[in-house]
Image (spheres, rainbow, N blue to C red):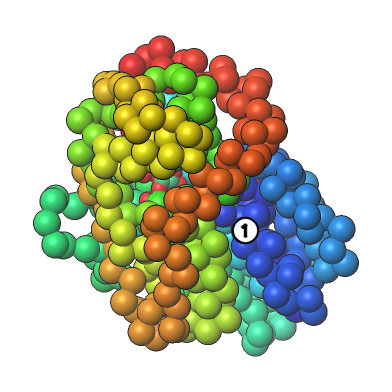
Amino acid sequence: MKIIITGGAGFIGSHVVRLFVTKYPAYQILNLDALTYAGNLENLRDIEDAPNYRLVKGDITDQAFVDQLFANEEPDAVIHLAAESHVDRSITDPLAFVKTNVLGTVNLLQAAKNLWKPLGYEGKTFYHVSTDEVYGSLDFGPEMFTEETSYDPRSPYSASKAASDHFVRAWHHTYGLPIKLSNCSNNYGPNHFPEKLIPLAIHRIQHGQPVPVYGKGENVRDWLFVKDHATAIDAVFHNGKVGETYNIGGVNEWANIELIHLLCDTLDEKTGKEKGTSRKLITFVTDRAGHDLRYAIDSSKIMNELGWKPSVTFEQGLSQTVDWYLENEAWLQNVTSGAYQDYYRTQYASR
Ligand code: NAD
Ligand code: DAU
């Protein structure tokens, strides 16, 4: 089987590529990635010479390129993760999100349909990886997003992901494309780009810099260890039903401020600082525009039907994550130079 995994040099994609390359040596894995600011081949250094792995550098918004690639490579499956993924960037540059997340997804759908439909769809899969943010925002309380929850995206990022989900389902209903979809909560773990809350906070605490917490820090997210998202994708890809959607989450809700407290205390303990030292860096800043209050995801379908469950507790996953960042200072140094610094200066200056 030949699988094109898009966005394989990014945070989640690199964990998915590694899992598939090592667990399924008989599969050929093509990593299709434009290597934007978020794509980093360092994430894949350990498997880049594997005989069943290949990088194809290219942009999914380039329709002619995507068509040619599918015609040349004749993949059996696509696992689509390439996206613009950061909510704050979508607020300042929404068009980039429309281009990559909507147009890029439609280019892939068309290329797959045009390649597969004439010969029949037997053995083919188009798997689209999406987010819980398409469901909108919940109040505090027991309610959770299920696979039946109506879409209500509220940021340019989530609107672009919601649109891409709709296009994927449209290609299934209109052209019979054998699709699978999953919507996952917030991931954390090694190789997470330090514009997102957890790696950003780790990086800033390490450098004794203010840790920006939006608003009052009361917003709630559900956190899942990235390697557990990768095993969930494996389960859906191999055993999920065609045409169906699976919610994936960690049953692990945290208010941002509580999470930052835990992170500060974990870092104090691991770096031999007096407890409370890092908490002094917490700085409340202007809230994110349209900041969704709470996400909570009901994962009972994937757990009951496919037997998937997270392998680590949050404390274990967070501890492993902090250790990874402490041991990989060079990785952080590399990604926090240049363009990222410029972006962060403008973000912080405007708050
Ligand atoms: P990321 O930003 O870390 O990585 C995105 C990757 O896509 C990068 O390697 C980048 O180079 C590549 N890419 C971007 N634009 C491209 C283009 N035009 N052509 C080809 N490649 C391009 O993202 P992530 O956090 O790993 O998220 C991966 C996917 O999972 C996304 O679809 C995202 O919406 C979804 N998701 C993310 C989370 C999360 O918590 N990070 C949760 C649920 C779902
Ligand atoms: O829910 C899944 C989504 O999780 C994914 O689809 C997105 O790709 C991913 O980026 C993530 O989106 P969030 O906006 O939830 O993640 P982020 O790390 O940017 O923010 C997490 C929470 O922390 C959110 O409530 C905003 C807040 N925050 C974030 C940053 C960067 C802060 O308080 N301070 C910050 O500096």
Above-or-below relation of 310 to 238: above
Identify residue type, mark 1. His
Hey, which quadrant is residue 166 in on the image? bottom left
In the rendered view of the protein, which quadrant contains the C terminus?
A: top left
Hey, which quadrant is residue 182 in on the image? bottom left
Q: Is residue 169 left or right of residue 139?
A: right
Whole-percent x, y for residue 118 in the image: 70, 79
Above-or-below relation of 178 to 109: below
**Residue at position x 64%, y 41% from top?**
327
Observer able to see residue 166: no
Observer able to see residue 142: yes
The residue carrying mark 1 is: 15
Q: Is residue 129 left or right of residue 259?
A: right
Whole-percent x, y for residue 263 in the image: 39, 40
Whole-percent x, y for residue 290 in the image: 25, 34
**Residue at position x 56%, y 46% from top?**
323
User: From this viewpoint, which residue is outermost toward the top?
Assistant: 349
